[in-house]
Image (tube, rainbow, N blue to C red):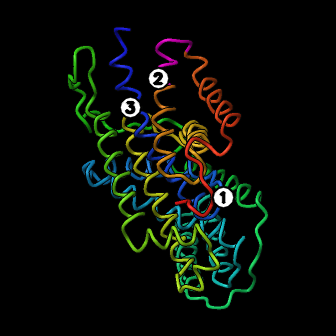
Amino acid sequence: MEQLPQQLVNGIWQGAALALFAVGYTLVFGLLDIVNLAHGATYMWGAFFGFVCVTKLNWSLWLAIPAAMIGAGLLAILLDRLAFKPLRTLTRGGLVLWGGFLILLLGIVGKWDDPLKWTLIGAGAIIMLVGVVQDYLTKVPLQVRQVPHLAPMIASIGASIILISLSQGIFGAQVARFPPGTVSDEPIQLVSGAVIAPVQLLVLVIGVVLMLALNFLITRTQVGRAIRAIAFNERTSRLLGINVDFVIAQTFFLSGALAGAAGVLLGLAVRRIDATMGNDVELAGLTVIIVGGMGSIWGAVAAAFLVGMLRVLSVAYLDSSFRDAFVFGLLILVLLVRPSGLFGRGSSTRA
């Protein structure tokens, strides 16, 4: 028990990182009732965006983190426009966007000489931009569909595979790390028997600040009121004049930005960035939003700290090989006792 203060500190900062990731998950579910299984890939790309800013552009970490959040947020919007929105509403702009994406993909993965390769990539990017603008300006869609429940989940799995493959093609399969000295390694003494590394403190502080900022945005701003209105009833929101597609894009941006921040911070903390880094945290994040209650932001936050603490304590005092088994044991227990999750509520009160 002498190690308990240290293990509690470890559980808290890991819970903060997990909360950042899981809140993005639950934001999209609360709005659209879909489980976005490409969220882990967005998290991975956020880590690589931060890595490129620090190692290739020589930016400071304080610039790299917001840049990674913006990059991951824009990637999440693109993900919605390519994988999810065509399932809900098909437009000519969406078809143009898909055409541009296929040309871009052909340019990236094809074995072309340099002039042709960059011509394909540039042309694909321009056509995608035209498609996004055309899609946004569309007043009368080609088709409005009732989406089967499994379709978005399957689409997100496909999108995740594409994003991971693109990452492996661009950055390679080897593990990348932030340069030594990006954050000081000197531990900070908290209390007797407990220290915290500066990067762990950074994860905790930024995680808490971002979650408080998100709470302010959801509860006190016009954007937050629009998100909650759409979560309550999309059709009524349209009748009230809310630009539903724009609000959905904003929600995906928020979700991706939080995943990007989590990617950079955890990439720093665990000293590991690779194409498959999202797989482990994706399962933990999925557990968190189910235990906390699907669509409940503060439920996800509370469950993230609970799961983070359980993972740390099971490694410290039990068998580390059963760490994930204990987490899924908690998941099964919650589903048996309270199927809607610890803080689960009806759809009318989500988001």
- 188 or 288: nearer the viewer: 288
- 139 or 226: nearer the viewer: 226
How packed mark 2 is, by other alpha carbons closer than 10 Å (few <14, some 14-19, many 20 or more), is many
Circle 1 sits on which residue? 34
Query: If you read the primary sequence from the N terminus, does the residue marked by circle 2 or circle 3 appear first?
Result: 3
Magenta span: chief secondary structure: helix
Q: Secondary structure at mark 3?
A: helix
Q: CA distance from mark 2 to mark 1?
A: 30 Å
Q: Secondary structure at mark 2?
A: helix
Q: Amino acid at mark 1?
A: Ile
Is residue 214 shown in magenta?
A: no
Is residue 312 shown in magenta?
A: yes
How many labels were placed on the picture?
Answer: 3
| Magenta stretch, residue numbers | 311-319
Look at the numbered discs 2 and 3 and tell me whether their residues touch, using CB distance below 8 Å.
no
Reply above or below: 136 against 3.
below
Q: Which mark is residue 12?
A: 3
Decide if residue 201 is on the left or right side of residue 323: left
Q: Position of residue 158 (x, y in %)?
A: 70, 55
Q: Which mark is residue 11?
A: none
How packed mark 1 is, by other alpha carbons closer than 10 Å (few <14, some 14-19, many 20 or more), is many
Q: Which mark is residue 312?
A: 2
- 287 or 184: nearer the viewer: 287
The residue at 21%/26% (across/down) is: 188
Q: Position of residue 124 (x, y in %)?
A: 58, 73
Q: CA distance from mark 2 to mark 3?
A: 9 Å
How packed mark 3 is, by other alpha carbons closer than 10 Å (few <14, some 14-19, many 20 or more), is many
Q: Position of residue 316 (x, y in %)?
A: 46, 14
Q: Secondary structure at mark 1?
A: loop
Q: Amino acid at mark 2?
A: Val
